[in-house]
Amino acid sequence: NSESVSASLRWFLGEMTPSTFFIKFWEKKPLVVRATDPADAKKSSDFFGMEFMLKTIAQEEVLYEDMTVCTYTDGERHNRNLSGRASAGDLRQFYEQENNTIQFYRPQRFSDILWKFSADLENDFGDLVGASAYLTPPKAQGLAPHHDDVDVFIIQTEGHKHWRVYAPEKGKELPRDHSNDLEMSDVAKLECVLDTTLNPGDRLYMPRGFVHYAFTEETEEGGTKGEGGGMGSCHVTVSTYQQHTWSDFLARLSPIVLRSAFMADFDYRQGLPRSYLDKVGGLKQIENYWDVKINPNHGATTAEAAAAKAEATMERGGGDMIVEENKKSSSL
């Protein structure tokens, strides 16, 4: 029942019903929810923010391993190499004077409202949920364009941040893995489906696979202070559905089912027929695929192609040679 969700998810969706969200947006396209009620901005500010982070670091044992401090300039991301216990003073300097973005991992350890929101979404989706907070100074960008391997629920808690979101290439929707940092020239080839600024209390849902990047602009109020009196941004990202697909489910289930069948059914314990390699058409299709699609020497003389294939086979550990030998022995 798509309407049986937590109050946390209902708040995130605003006036949209859960049924509409799951039918039209979930795993399909981004959704922006604007803060139409001043209470939304107030509630969002309680999730996480700059002063909350600095106070937490001063009072708790927080390590630099719990965060990434970075900048993205001239098309490259630069991470600071930090270790040991985090210093509130140093982080303020990195942020205000050196224009670094701070990505704070697992902030729900210190924020009760974020912990409750994350726990509610775990119940709603039946999967583990993670969270990070991102604090970015004015006129800055912390991360390169990329796509994630998780669906994300973003809450703008302080300041303003501009987002550009691009649809995946056709046939590459809902990827299993996250991307590396992407070049702007590659991003420019994609369709931009969202170009908007999030303000305090606004929310953004984004399916996995959508390429995105975000940056701040200098504003007058409502953000975390940075160099020159400008205002920066803080948002929290709550993520889920990492490797939580039918394919992953079946990959985990299949060995259990096959092992159970092996133990319970004599037929599954019998050896394969001696000539099975000659009967399985898929292996011949794979060989044809090599010859036509993969072999860079396709169209060369028979001797040249055979030499190239033998060399590639050796590089892969001789797998094709073993299959060929099995074919010969099974025909004896």
Image (cartoon, rainbow, N blue to C red):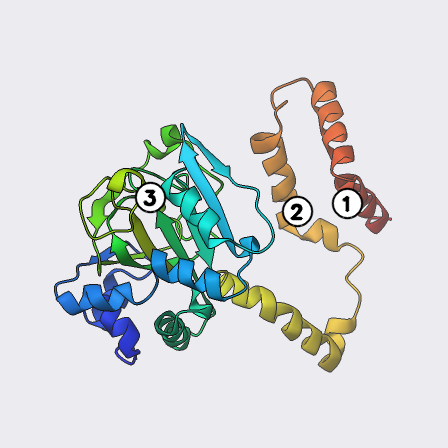
Given residues 154 and 298, the one toward you in this image is: 154
Q: Nearer the viewer, mark 3 or mark 1?
A: 3
The amino acid marked with disc number 2 is: Leu
Residue found at x 37% / y 31%: 184
Coordinates of residue 64 in the picture (x, y in percent): 54, 53
**Label 2 sits on residue:** 283
Q: Residue at x 20, y 63 (%)?
A: 41
Pointer 1: what residue?
A: 323
User: Which mark is on residue 245?
Assistant: none
- Asked if residue 157 shows in the view, the reply is yes
Q: Pointer 2 and pointer 3: residues touching (CB < 8 Å)?
A: no
Image coordinates of residue 137 in percent, x first then y, are 33, 44
Q: Which is nearer the eye, 23 or 95?
A: 95
Badge 2 vs badge 1, beta-carbon distance below 8 Å: yes
- Position of residue 141 in the picture relative to residue 281 (left or right): left
Taking the image as shown, residue 93 lies to the left or right of residue 26, namely right
Q: Earlier in the sequence, mark 2 or mark 3?
A: 3
Residue 147 makes an appearance in the image: no
Q: What residue type is disc 3 on?
A: Pro
Percent across and percent down for residue 222 are 20, 53
Query: What residue is pinned by disc 3?
Result: 137
- At numbered mark 2, what does the secondary structure look like: helix, strand or loop? helix
Looking at the picture, how far across and down is residue 243, in whole percent?
50, 60
Element assignment for label 3: loop
Disc 2 and disc 3: Cα gap in Å? 56 Å
Confirm or deny contact between disc 3 and disc 1 (CB under 8 A): no
Cα gap from disc 3 to disc 1, whole angstroms: 59 Å
Q: Amino acid at mark 1?
A: Val
**Disc 1 residue crowd, few under 14, some 14–19, many 20+, Cα 10 Å:** few
* Quadrant of res 250: bottom right
Depth check: give the residue in front, 253 or 321: 253
Look at the image and tell me in which quarter the N terminus lies. Answer: bottom left
